[in-house]
Amino acid sequence: MKKDQYLLGLSEGSREYWDVQLDVGRYKNIIHLYLIEVPEKHRGKGYAKLLMKRICNYADRQKCIVTLKPTAQFGADLERLVSFYRSFGFVFNADDNYREDIAEVMYRCNATESEQYYV
């Protein structure tokens, strides 16, 4: 599998400039966000929001779906984290939004698919 140069650069840049751990990968038309970990001393500065905007904008340009599994494992409040992802258009992969082709807990369709799947 070939590395996505944009996502690789975004990961390396976030670590180098802000000390933010970003682990994101792409396979075909799915971008999977494994981790955004902002050190406590840098929280509240908008780094995660900026990274999410860049990932979502890139996904839209590439006509990709973004998937993720929110977790409190790294110190985040799970309810707040889910709210954060919802603000970018993520939905739970359940009920009316369920998609068999997506294995993760939450997903965000690209701009061209969004009206087709969002309820």
Image (tube, rainbow, N blue to C red):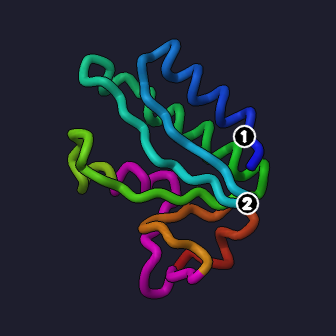
Which numbered tag is attached to residue 81? Answer: none
Q: Observer-nearest residue: 114 or 15?
A: 15
Q: Residue at x 49, y 20 (%)?
A: 15
Give the vertical position of 52 relative to 107 (above or below).
above
Q: Are marks 1 and 2 in contact (CB under 8 Å)?
A: no
Of the two numbered discs 1 and 2 on the same chain, state the one appearing first in sequence: 1
Q: Residue at x 52, y 64 (%)?
A: 107
Q: Percent from the top left, x then y, of residue 77? A: 21, 47
Q: Which residues are magenta?
A: 82-100
> In the orientation shown, which residue stands out farthest toward the front?
1
Q: Percent from the top left, x then y, of residue 93? A: 46, 75
Disc 2 residue type (three-letter): Asn
Q: How many marks?
A: 2
Queried whether the magenta region covers residue 35, the answer comes back as no
Q: Secondary structure at mark 1?
A: loop
Q: Nearer the viewer, mark 1 or mark 2?
A: 1
72 lies left or right of 82? left
Read off the residue under disc 2: 29
Question: Where is residue 44, by image quadrant?
Answer: top left
The 10 Å Cα crowd at callout 2, few under 14, some 14 to 19, many 20 or more, is few
Give the vertical position of 9 relative to 36 (above or below).
above
Q: Residue at x 35, y 28 (%)?
A: 38
Q: Residue at x 43, y 81 (%)?
A: 94
Which numbered tag is attached to residue 3? Answer: 1
Queried whether the magenta region covers residue 96, the answer comes back as yes
Disc 1 residue type (three-letter): Lys
> In the orientation shown, which residue stands out farthest toward the top?
17
Q: CA distance from mark 1 to mark 2?
A: 13 Å
Q: Percent from the top left, x then y, of residue 6? A: 72, 34
